[in-house]
Image (spheres, rainbow, N blue to C red):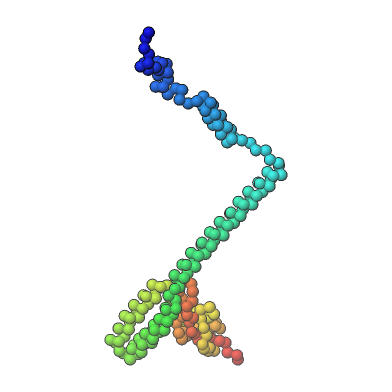
Amino acid sequence: MKDTSTEEELPREADTEKAASGEGTVDDGDQTAAVAAESSKKKAKDKTIKIKQSEYDRLVDEAATNKDKYVRLFAEFDNARKRMEREKMEFAKYANEEILVDLLGLFDNLERSLHYAQEHKMENLTKGLEMVIKEAKEILRKYGVEPIEAEGKVFDPHRHEILMQEDNDELEEGTVLQELQKGYMMGEKVIRTAKVKVSTKSSD
């Protein structure tokens, strides 16, 4: 009688080949479920939902309303952004206005001193003052400050301020006869009106 107690059962050749190739490691039931799930997922993408015409119309109207609100909100936001940029530029442009207006008084005094020096033939003082005034004009021009034309012009209430009047039948009424104090503009803005004497017609 042959002793089999020490013998081990060897795997069959067919089973060994399946294990090596990976076959038989996935249950057929699981494979079927996976394929069904994938198929169901693809169908869900193309799924057609039936709704009432009234509900469809309501959704279309709601979408159009929301789009209109979005367009209006975007336009308002864009306008606000542009307005803020303009205000920022205006502020930067006129931020030094108050200081420049104060400096105009100093500039007036320099010009008065120059006239005095010229009248009294003070050549050295005249040359010095001319150099300072030239430099001051360049600084004012750098910030966009320019003198207002007055003498010989028709009176402009936005740019001129009447301090004196004088009868003159040879000129059109309201003609600026004399500039008593210079006026200045910064860009398009009047920062100091010109003080003037204007012509009037005699009452005779």
- Identify whether 63 is placed above or below 78: above
Residue drawn at the location 39% of the way across and 76% of the way down: 140
Q: Quadrant of the N terminus?
A: top left
Res 48 quadrant in image: top right
Residue drawn at the location 50% of the way across and 65% of the way down: 84
Res 13 quadrant in image: top left
- Identify whether 113 is placed above or below 59: below
Q: Nearer the viewer, residue 70 or 36?
A: 36
- Identify whether 64 is placed above or below 139: above
| Percent x, y of residue 110 | 37, 85
Left or right, 137 with respect to 158, comes to left
Viewer can see residue 152: no
Res 20 quadrant in image: top left
Left or right, 82 with respect to 107, comes to right
Which residue sits furthest top?
Answer: 1
Q: Nearer the viewer, residue 21 or 1?
A: 1
Left or right, 114 with respect to 29, comes to left
Q: Quadrant of the C terminus?
A: bottom right
- Identify whether 111 is placed above or below 78: below
Q: Nearer the viewer, residue 40 or 64?
A: 40
| Percent x, y of residue 74 | 56, 56
Which residue sits furthest left?
Answer: 124
| Percent x, y of residue 97 | 44, 76
- The number of numbered badges drawn on the structure is 0
